[in-house]
């Protein structure tokens, strides 16, 4: 049977904060800048089943996607995602 609603991996407060700390460090932004993260199911056949969308509420506003669950994101993933230029 196909699971149409797979469970998203649980994320701890510590895991969320670790990824945010890496983002503040790599982007060199003020720690008062709001960062929002959401785990989303990816329906594109070319991507893993789960991705993390990260919205950085700076000026200009920025959205980053990492094709992993929040709990699986590493410092290297953050650096790589920041290095990718957004599409115009």
Image (cartoon, grey):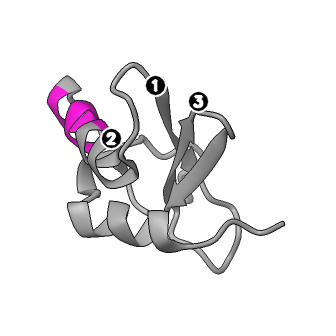
Residue shown at 32% from the left, 54% from the top: 26
Q: Residues within 10 Å of mark 2 (few under 14, many from 20)?
A: some
Instruction: Reply above or below: 45 against 78.
Output: below
Badge 2 marks a residue whose secondary structure is: helix
For the residues labelled 2 and 3, the Cα–Cα distance comes to 12 Å
For the residues labelled 1 and 2, the Cα–Cα distance comes to 9 Å
Q: Are marks 1 and 2 in contact (CB under 8 Å)?
A: yes
Query: What secondary structure characterizes most of the magenta part?
Result: helix
Magenta residues (range) = 14-20
Q: Which residue is mark 3?
A: 57
For the residues labelled 3 and 1, the Cα–Cα distance comes to 6 Å
Which residue occupies the extreme bottom position in the image? 46
Between residue 59 and residue 42, name the one nearer to us. Answer: 59
Left or right: 44 in relation to 49: right
Q: Which residue is mark 1?
A: 33
**Residue 1 shows up from this direction:** no
Residue shown at 49% from the left, 30% from the top: 36
Badge 1 marks a residue whose secondary structure is: loop
């Amino acid at each position: 049977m196909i699971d149409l609603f797979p469970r998203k991996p649980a994320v701890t407060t510590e895991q969320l904060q670790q990824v945010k700390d890496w983002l503040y460090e790599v982007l060199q932004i003020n720690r008062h800048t709001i960062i929002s993260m959401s785990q989303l199911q990816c329906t594109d056949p070319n991507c893993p089943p789960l991705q993390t969308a990260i919205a950085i509420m700076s000026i200009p506003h920025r959205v980053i996607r990492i094709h992993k669950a929040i709990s699986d994101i590493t410092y290297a993933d953050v650096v790589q995602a920041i290095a990718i230029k957004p599409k115009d």
